[in-house]
Image (cartoon, rainbow, N blue to C red):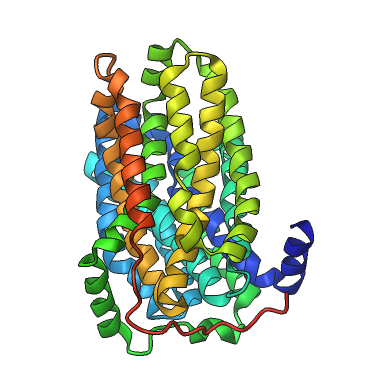
Amino acid sequence: MKNNYLQLIKSHPATLTFGANHYFFSSIGQSFFLSLFIPFFMERVGISHDGFSYYYALASFFGGLMLSFIGPIVDQVDVRKYGYFNGLLCALCCIWMAHIHQPWMLLIGLAGLRLSGQGMMPLAGAAAMGKYFHHNRGKALAVAALGMSVGEILAPIFLVALLQYLPWKTLWYWLAIFEGIIFPLSSFLLVGKEPAFAKTALKKGEEKSRQFVKTLLTSGSFWIWGLLFVFTPFLAAGVMIHHHALLNIKGWTVTHYALGFTGFGVARIVISLMAGPMVDRFSAGKISPFLLLPLSLGMILLHWFEGEWVLFLFLLILGGTLSFGSICGTAYWAEIYGPEKMGTAKSMVSTLMVFACAAAPVIFVPLFKASFFPWTFPFLLMLAVVLSFAASKTRPVSTEEPEVLAPKEEV
């Protein structure tokens, strides 16, 4: 496996870095990044922590709604131009965040960052890998996704350090420079003259894309597979936002949670590298119905056992499943609909994921109440089993033969 990755990286260093670049710069719209500014936002616009939670959920919902319209454009244009535009959009949102002084301004800024950072940025990175690579698509996605892991590790450290010396508003101006200048410039230097990226747009443009979106939305199989890939991010969002309630019910401490989250991060990297070759060998369509099997085991353990080791093991499994699902969820749509349509399908699932993550904080409030908790994980386990079984019996059928537009890699 190590040699396969090294060969791939040696053959396509610029293209893989281009994908990882998108994942890394998507940190600005992720929950772990924005949460570091919550105290400053609350003080600036005069809202409580609960108030911020509602604004954040609403902003995520609006971001997901906009992604459903903007996301499919990735299949209509050169993916590089899509990325450049998104970098500028991120920069404008950063400048906006430096000037907020009313709750409605915070809502608009958060919605923009959730759209451009959490939504469009990783979508462009995934689409680039899915369109450019064919035989090594799984491994390429795994390498690119490491950019997000690097962001999760480095961004909080640097932010906390910089906030000791810079006003938080000034920091948002620096973030605008990174997103609006450094990101587009580095992306251009990497693949600005790569002709293969210009060959991945839908031939009939917007009209064909809209027709395909309608086909997806009226397909029961698309919803089954979409919900299968969204289940893990939904569960992760609920557990992370309400982890204090879980810790209180189980009698665990924040220290146990922090230790478990370390395992979560390590698992994301390790499983990501393992998932790539598996997807290339067996195909995402064959593997994905078993995606929630380890997570189901984790939920059983979390329901029946009280030891601190259970939390660590559950977060380990959760992190691994998130990485595996991310790679399978991108490769699967490329396998089914071909490189020229996979971006649209992926964007629709990304929209569904954003909606699910926005709803999770509200849905998990009653689920993590002590009175209902004995039924919480059996209920979630039942959902996981139903989705897995339904996916194993259902497979979307492409309306056309997929056209492989990317060059064949010599790996």
Q: Nearer the viewer, residue 82 or 305?
A: 305
Q: Quadrant of the C terminus?
A: bottom right
Residue 241 visible in this rendered orientation of the protein? yes
Judged left or right of residue 290, residue 155 is: right
Residue 112 visible in this rendered orientation of the protein? no
The structure residue drawn at horizontal position 31% and vertical position 26%, both measured from the top left corner, is 376
Image position, residue 209 (x, y; %): 30, 79
Furthest residue in direction top, as rendered: 251
Image position, residue 108 (x, y; %): 27, 50
Q: How many marks?
A: 0
Judged left or right of residue 269, residue 411 is: right
Q: Nearer the viewer, residue 285 or 176?
A: 285
The structure residue drawn at horizontal position 57% and vertical position 55%, both measured from the top left corner, is 145
Furthest residue in direction bottom, as rendered: 203
The structure residue drawn at horizontal position 57% and vertical position 61%, both measured from the top left corner, is 279
The structure residue drawn at horizontal position 54% and vertical position 16%, both measured from the top left corner, is 308
Judged left or right of residue 211, residue 183 is: right
Q: Quadrant of the N terminus?
A: bottom right
Q: Nearer the viewer, residue 282 or 128?
A: 282
Judged left or right of residue 112, residue 406 is: right
Image position, residue 109 (x, y; %): 32, 49
Q: Nearer the viewer, residue 82 or 176?
A: 82
Q: Is residue 336 above or below residue 394?
A: below
Image position, residue 186 (x, y; %): 62, 67
Q: Is residue 179 above or below residue 37?
A: below
